[in-house]
Amino acid sequence: MTRYQVKHTRNGQVCYGIVRSYGEEVEAAKALGLVIVDDAVLPTSCKIRDRALTDVEVKLPGRFDHEAGGWSDLGEYDAYVQDAWKAAKAVSDAVVNGVGIGSMFTIGVGDGSAHYVVVKINKKTCRVEWRGFCGDRYTDHHFGWGGTFKLEDVARYVESERAMTRLFSKKAKV
C-alpha cells in the first residue's frame, strides 16, 4: 500500500503531512525503517518510524462556502490545512500597509497556486517561506521553497494580493 496523507504525534502535538515517495533519501530512510514525511503546511520534513504514522483518509471536499470563506465537509487533513490557512490569512490581513511579518501572497502556478508568507524583514530584503495551502503543493519558479528576496520585489506581490482581495471582496464599495 502506498501511503499519502498521514498524521503522527510529536511533543504532544498532532502533526499532519505527506509521505515522500521517491528519491535517494527516501530509499536510505526506508533501509532504516523510517519514512520521510513532508509537513502539511510548513517547508519542513522529518524522518519517522513507519509504525508511528496513522494514515488519514483522503476525502473530496464538499462545496465552497463563500460566507464562511472555506470548504465544507473536509477530511481531517484538509481541515487542518484550511485552518492553518485561515490563521495565516488573519495575521496577513492585520498588516494593513506595506510588508510586515506574516504578510502573505499567492502566485498562480499550473492549475493551482503557490503560497508564501513573509517571516523576516531587513532594511532592503525579506525572507519568505513557502506554505502548503494548495493541495497540489506547487512552488513558484522564482520563489521556490522560499529564501531571501528584495523587499521592494516582495512588496509588489503583497500589494497586488491586497488589491485583488479588495477588488473581489463582497464588501467592496464601488
Image (cartoon, rainbow, N blue to C red):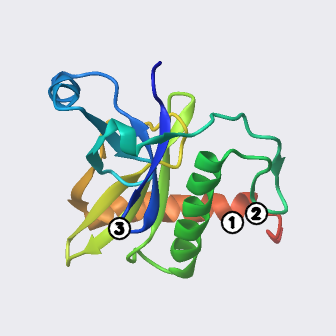
User: Label 1 belongs to which residue?
Assistant: 166
Taking 101 as reference, is 46 left or right? left
Q: Is residue 26 left or right of residue 9?
A: left
Q: Which residue is mark 2?
A: 169
The residue most toward the front is: 51
Give x and y (percent) for residue 13. 44, 66
Residue 140 visible in image: no
Q: Amino acid at mark 2?
A: Ser
The one of 117 and 12 positioned closer to us in this rendering:
12
The span from disc 1 to disc 3 (Cα, nearest Å) is 40 Å
| Res. 39 mark | none
The part of the image, by quadrant, that contains residue 99 is bottom left
Compared with residue 123, is residue 37 higher up or lower down, i.e. above or below?
above
User: As shown in the figure, which amino acid type bears the numbered disc 1?
Assistant: Arg
Q: Residues within 10 Å of mark 1 (few under 14, many from 20)?
A: few
**x and y, in percent, of residue 163 in the image:** 60, 63
The residue singled out by tag 3 in the image is 11
Quarter holding the C terminus? bottom right
Q: Secondary structure at mark 1?
A: helix
Instruction: Look at 52% across and 76% down and name the residue there.
Output: 91
The quadrant where residue 168 appears: bottom right
Residue 104 percent coordinates (x, y):
47, 63
The x, y position of residue 35, in whole percent, is 29, 35
Dots 2, 1 in contact, CB < 8 A: yes
Residue toward you, 59 or 144: 59
Task: Residue at 37% x, 39% y: name it.
Answer: 51
